[in-house]
Amino acid sequence: MRNKDALKIYSLLLKRYPDALDSPTTVGRGTPFQVLILTILSAQTTDRAVLLVKKPLFSRYRTPAALANADIPDVEEIIHSLGFYHAKARHIIAAAHTLVSEFGGKVPLTMDELVTLPGVGRKTANIVLYHAFGKNEGIAVDTHVKRLAQRIGFSGTSDQDRIEQNLMRLFPQEKWGDLTDLLIAHGRACCTAKKPHCGVCPIACHCRYFQNLKKTS
């Protein structure tokens, strides 16, 4: 796909989902510490579910130091509804401990430092860097972004790292963070995992999946 075609798709998605870039129903709002912890918790669950535990979690553990000293069963009780809560509780407590012991209680500002935190991979680090600090160092490739990148034709691979590199080549750096939010919004509302709703899709005429569908119909 050409860069200009990718940017056209970006513009159409932005027109359809203008609220996606500053949605109150995402984990990417709050202090850097809150964004980090909530993003770790958001793995394999919805942002909406994670936001339900935001208030009880941070009203009890307001700082990295407080969370670092938390008892695992107490944290598990708060985040029990999220699924995988045993591992997630360990991860966020360990991440908070690393913040205190290695970074003076502050969320680090670089990719290399962020991925040293327990429970943090490149996807999580990209979300934290963009939403907490406004830094576009990469593109967060979650399940929605991966699916849409393949369907639309941004990438021809299923490898998340290669998909990220393909997207970074197609789009200017200043759009990387917003691109993730737009693709997630479109993946939830229209291009769903079970069945894409091509008949109401604003980018169907630019989409590889839809063009292939027409050829076989």
Image (spheres, rainbow, N blue to C red):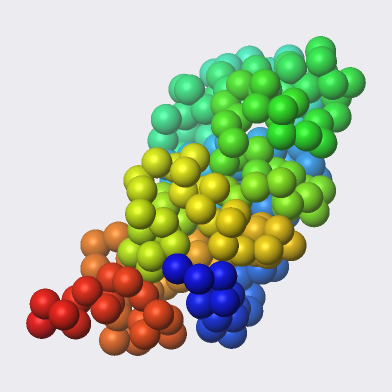
Q: Count the marks: how many?
A: 0
**Residue 1: x %, y % from top left:** 45, 68
- Is 186 located above or below residue 102 in the figure? below
Q: Quadrant for residue 108, please give it.
A: top right
**Residue 208: x %, y % from top left:** 32, 71
Taking the image as shown, residue 187 lies to the left or right of residue 134, namely left
**Residue 155: x %, y % from top left:** 41, 56
Q: Quadrant for residue 149, please give it.
A: bottom left
Query: Residue at point 36% right, 82% down?
Result: 204
Q: What residue occupies the far left of the structure in this picture?
A: 217
In this view of the protein, can residue 51 be seen by the observer? no
Q: What residue occupies the far right of the structure in this picture?
A: 104
Query: Residue at point 75% right, 26% down?
Result: 113
Query: Residue at point 72% right, 28% down?
Result: 112
- Is 112 located above or below residue 180 in the figure? above
In this view of the protein, can residue 190 be seen by the observer? yes
Task: For the C terminus, give its image quadrant.
Answer: bottom left
**Residue 130: x %, y % from top left:** 73, 51
- Is 101 located above or below residue 201 in the figure? above
Please tell me which residue lies in front, 67 or 28: 28
Taking the image as shown, residue 45 lies to the left or right of residue 139, namely left
Taking the image as shown, residue 162 lies to the left or right of residue 103, namely left
Please tell me which residue lies in front, 193 or 210: 210
Query: Residue at point 33% right, 64% down?
Result: 151
